[in-house]
């Protein structure tokens, strides 16, 4: 996926502006992060963090976002993960 990439301690984000008028999100959590239970927990936390960012702070109205979890995300608390995701999105220019 082309676009702007940015990283933080627990996630890497790639953002591409589109003309679809909607925000599309893909979350990737590889087996390097942990077993299935850990991967699903990280995925749920990232999904909820993105939901809060979409409704609260507001992302640009028409973008594609790819979120890749790093292995350190397995040990991160929800607040650390949310802060890391927010910082990466801001650096990538996804905030309105």
Image: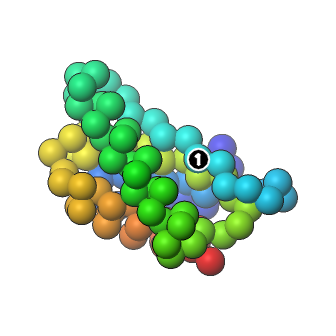
Mark 1 Cα within 10 Å, few/some/many (few <14, many 20+)?
few
- Name the residue carrying label 1: 25
Which residue lies at the image location 31% right of the left edge and 66% below the top edge?
A: 83
Which residue lies at the image location 66% right of the left edge and 69% below the top edge?
A: 60
Label 1 sits on a secondary structure element that is strand
Q: Work out whether residue 43 can be spotted.
A: yes
Quarter of the image that includes the N terminus: top right
Residue extending farthest right = 19
From the top left corner, tell me how far across and down residue 70 is, in percent.
31, 43
From the top left corner, tell me how far across and down residue 86 is, in percent.
41, 67
Q: How many marks?
A: 1
60 vs 4, nearest the viewer: 60
Which residue lies at the image location 40% right of the left edge and 51% below the top edge?
A: 48
Colour scheme of the rendered structure: rainbow
Q: Work out whether residue 92 can be spotted.
A: no
Q: Please, is residue 23 above or below residue 39 in the view?
A: below
From the top left corner, tell me how far across and down residue 19 is, in percent.
84, 58
Which residue lies at the image location 82% right of the left edge and 54% below the top edge?
A: 20
Q: Please, is residue 15 above or below residue 40 in the view?
A: below
Q: Please, is residue 42 above or below residue 55 in the view?
A: above
Residue extending farthest front = 55
93 vs 5, nearest the viewer: 93
Judge left or right: residue 9 versus residue 5.
left
95 vs 16, nearest the viewer: 95
Quarter of the image that includes the C terminus: bottom right
Judge left or right: residue 30 versus residue 60.
left
From the top left corner, tell me how far across and down residue 92 is, in percent.
54, 67
């Amino acid at each position: 996926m082309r676009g702007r990439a940015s990283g933080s301690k627990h996630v890497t984000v790639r953002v591409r502006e589109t003309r679809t008028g909607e925000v599309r999100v893909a979350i990737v959590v590889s087996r390097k992060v942990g077993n299935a239970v850990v991967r699903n927990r990280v995925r749920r936390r990232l999904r909820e963090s993105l939901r809060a960012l979409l409704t609260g702070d507001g992302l640009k109205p028409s973008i594609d976002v790819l979120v890749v979890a790093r292995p350190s995300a397995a040990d991160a608390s929800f607040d650390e993960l949310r802060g890391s995701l927010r910082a990466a999105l801001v650096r990538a220019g996804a905030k309105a």
